[in-house]
Image (cartoon, helix red, strand yellow):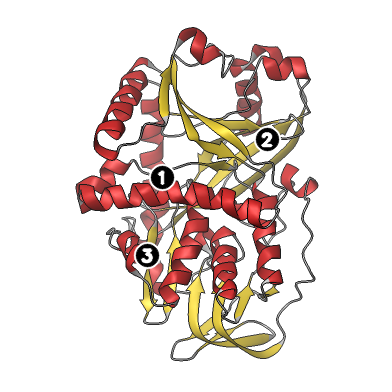
């Protein structure tokens, strides 16, 4: 039994209506059954349907229930890990391919929004903020290496007055601006993909949790009240896939992130916070990230929990952080609080692959999935259509299970996170 999602600003500002998505009842057939109604699943379903495939999409809750509808909404090139980690594992040529596909993911996001007229507040501009002097050195080295080895020149290192033109705070000694990054309303974007999929012929069934999968060709996906027989399956549940594929157990950890939204800011306050409407994330391991909504609310995210419990003093710490960053906002009301789970892999790289010859998955975006998940859906569709080369570039990334087994996995991860949290303070 699933619990109701936390109250969210995104739920209160939905601008996309879907056709009725009734629970699955009875037996049906499709070329492809997609499990999961987030960005990955909706993108895969849309791309397949546009190419003539019959598609059924099953979602255990509502479309966008998971991270796709609750996140910070930042759309960025790159992965949850830095590209140099990929380079060490797969070599520079494969790393370059993955980097370029991550840039394609951002462009694809903009193209889908434009093509399907999705009202999701798309805006461009991203700042990666140094919190301490060693971060400044790391950002400068990253910028130089990306220009030299990856021919990526969309970044600028900003300090002093140039920094304060973009974010008006004394908290950061430098920021690396990235013209290719941006932000959007994540729930409206996800709903927009689902609406486009419906218009392309996809049958979407919400409140239809998958209870069992009978492997084979065709395969059968069973819910409480119905079943789908399909030639191909896609698992796109990420942190919410509920162990329907035991082969993936231990490869992904659920991490709870927390967000708040302020009351709307005045134009004068916006000018003293993010005058160019950039999104921002800092360089800490346990990072802070924020942006402005179209209604001028500051939407701020931070803190993480791996044990399923809200961190002690969370609300007070998050509220205080707003004032620390922007003293001009002291006392501003916090009107929304919510949280949700993201899927984290051990190496922070996305985990794509095959469970069976006709059963594919994409997961583990590690906090970097708003753009990449849309591309993952497209690559899954390409693979089913017999063109798996690009999907296989990602699938070549090796992934290990989190250590400790089912009993110790979470405690060990909490210890590791506490270590990095301590390091962030040094």
Classify mark 1: residues with Cα within 10 Å, few (<14), some (14-19) or many (20+).
Answer: some
Seen from the viewer's position, the closer of residues 179 and 354 is: 179
Q: Which residue is mark 2?
A: 260
Q: Which residue is mark 3?
A: 391
Position of residue 394 relative to residue 359, above or below, is above
| Secondary element type, mark 2 | strand
Q: Which residue is mark 1?
A: 80
Using the image, tell me which numbered label, if any, was put on residue 126.
none
Query: Is the C-beta separation of discs 1 and 3 under 8 Å?
Result: no
Residue at image location 44% in from the left, 76% down from the top = 384
Quarter of the image for residue 157 reads top left
Q: Give the spatial CA distance, label 1 vs label 3.
A: 17 Å
Q: Give the spatial CA distance, label 2 vs label 3.
A: 35 Å
> Is residue 291 something one can see in this rendering?
yes
Side of 120 where 405 appears, left or right:
left
In the image, residue 244 lies at what x, y percent? 49, 74
Give the mark toward the camera: 1 or 3. 3
Quarter that holds the C terminus: top left
Classify mark 3: residues with Cα within 10 Å, few (<14), some (14-19) or many (20+).
Answer: many
| Secondary element type, mark 1 | loop
Q: Give the spatial CA distance, label 2 vs label 1.
A: 22 Å
């Amino acid at each position: 039994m699933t619990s109701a999602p936390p109250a969210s600003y995104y739920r209160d500002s939905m601008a996309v209506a879907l056709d009725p998505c009734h629970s699955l009842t009875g037996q049906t057939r499709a070329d492809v059954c997609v499990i999961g109604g987030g960005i990955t699943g909706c993108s895969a379903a849309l791309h397949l349907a546009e190419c003539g495939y019959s598609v059924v999409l099953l979602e255990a809750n509502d479309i966008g229930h998971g991270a796709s509808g609750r996140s910070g909404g930042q759309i960025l090139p790159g992965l949850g890990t830095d590209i140099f980690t990929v380079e060490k594992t797969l070599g520079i040529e494969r790393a370059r391919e993955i980097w370029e596909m991550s840039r394609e993911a951002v462009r694809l996001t903009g193209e889908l929004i434009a093509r399907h007229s999705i009202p999701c507040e798309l805006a461009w501009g991203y700042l990666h903020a140094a919190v301490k002097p060693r971060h400044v050195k790391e950002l400068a080295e990253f910028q130089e290496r990306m220009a030299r080895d990856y021919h990526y020149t969309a970044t600028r290192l900003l300090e002093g007055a140039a920094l304060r033109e973009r974010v008006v705070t004394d908290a950061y000694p430098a920021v690396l601006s990235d013209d290719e990054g941006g932000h959007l309303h994540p729930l409206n974007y996800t709903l927009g993909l689902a609406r486009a999929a419906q218009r392309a012929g996809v049958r979407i069934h919400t409140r239809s949790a998958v209870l069992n999968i009978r492997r084979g060709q065709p395969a059968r996906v069973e819910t409480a009240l119905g079943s789908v027989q399909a030639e191909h399956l896609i698992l796109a549940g990420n942190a919410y896939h509920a162990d329907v594929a035991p082969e993936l157990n231990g490869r992904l950890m659920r991490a709870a992130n927390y967000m708040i939204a302020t009351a709307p800011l005045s134009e004068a306050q916006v000018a003293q916070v993010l005058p160019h409407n950039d999104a921002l994330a800092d360089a800490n391991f346990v990072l802070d990230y924020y942006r402005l909504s179209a209604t001028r609310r500051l939407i701020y995210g931070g803190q993480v929990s791996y044990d399923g419990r809200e961190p002690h003093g969370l609300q007070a710490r998050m509220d205080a952080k707003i004032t620390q960053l922007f003293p001009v906002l002291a006392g501003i009301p916090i009107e929304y609080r919510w949280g949700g789970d993201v899927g984290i892999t051990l190496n922070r790289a996305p985990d794509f692959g095959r469970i069976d010859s006709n059963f594919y998955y994409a997961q583990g975006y590690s906090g970097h999935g708003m753009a990449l998940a849309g591309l993952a859906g497209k690559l899954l569709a390409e693979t089913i259509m017999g063109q798996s080369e690009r999907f296989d570039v990602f699938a070549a990334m090796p992934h290990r299970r989190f250590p400790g087994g089912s009993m110790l996995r979470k405690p060990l991860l909490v210890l590791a996170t506490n270590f990095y949290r301590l390091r962030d303070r040094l």
